[in-house]
Image (spheres, grey):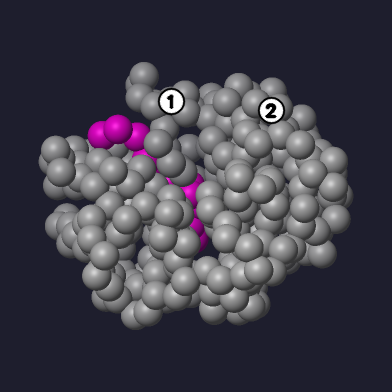
Amino acid sequence: MVQSQTIIEVDRINISQNIIGPNFQPDRFVNTVNGIIFLDIDSRQLGLWSSDSIKLSGGYGTDYAGMFDPVDFLSNQLDIYLLDGAENKITRYDNQLNFIQSFPLTGEDSVLPSFFTIDSRQNFYFYSFETNNIYRTRSLSGQFDTFLDLTRSGVNNDCIVDFKFSTNDNFILLFDCLKELYLFSRSGKLVRRFPLDIKNPIRAINYNNSWFTINRVGMLQFIDKDPIELKLDGQNIIDAIFYQNLFYVLTESELIIFEIINSK
């Protein structure tokens, strides 16, 4: 039986009053057991939103709590990890944004990381536009080696906008200029290329052992399905995640929560 999906809005939260302001404009977000954590790349701050208040951490600086060039962050188990591109380091926080540790990315070559992700064994993988390579660290450390040379794999485009692992440790690369999603095995072998009908995709979301993509204007597409348009009232999507069976969408002023219902 072929499944189809219906997407229903279940909540819409105005965050323009108690989160977004002149000194905090979130670009990315993750969900944790203690609330939602936002990253403002320009102000170099993390913000934990819980009980309608926000706790800020970070800011420009070179001490243990400061950030220089935050380019990506993720939530894994009970911790938050932030990738600093120019500083070539990963900083680890608990889910209350308390600093735990920071470790530099060290390998045979100096690499400027662009995105990162983590597998089930807690190995970090980061991609560099500069080299078109994916690198892998040795568990929770900064020691890394080259994992995959994308040019040798026939991937010569540098318009990657998302890089994620699934629960079974396959991983994807999302290309906005190609309108394609590339699926790789955990060993780095290209398994399949999925064409997309939506323009300028920004995120790929793992869902029910498959994937769907979304763009800034709210066009969403499951693999091998027709696109679905979300009702955003003219707003643009900044970021999107799937957490505990709900789909969260961050816009310029709202956090919109959807439920995905499968039917046969």
Q: Quadrant of the C terminus?
A: top right
Looking at the rendering, which quadrant does residue 95 occupy? Answer: bottom left
Q: Residue 190 location, x and y as percent? A: 84, 50
The magenta stretch is 241-253
Secondary structure at numbered mark 2:
loop
Spatial CA distance of label 1 from label 2 is 22 Å
Residue 250 belongs to magenta span:
yes
Residue most toward the front? 109
Q: Residue 118 location, x and y as percent? A: 59, 66
Q: Mark 1 sits on what residue? A: 231
Q: Residue 20 location, x and y as percent? A: 20, 42
Prevailing SS of the magenta stretch: strand
Q: Residue at x 43, y 46 (%)?
A: 248
Q: Mark 2 sits on what residue? A: 179
Which mark is drawn over residue 101?
Answer: none
Q: Residue at x 40, y 69 (%)?
A: 91
Q: Amino acid at mark 1?
A: Lys
Q: Residue 217 location, x and y as percent? A: 47, 24
Circle 1 Cα neighbour tier, 10 Å, few/some/many (<14 / 14–19 / ≥20) = few
Q: Quadrant of the N terminus?
A: top right
- 51 to 225, vertically: above or below: below
Circle 1/circle 2 CB separation < 8 Å:
no
- Apparent side of residue 238 relative to residue 114 in the rendered image (left or right): left
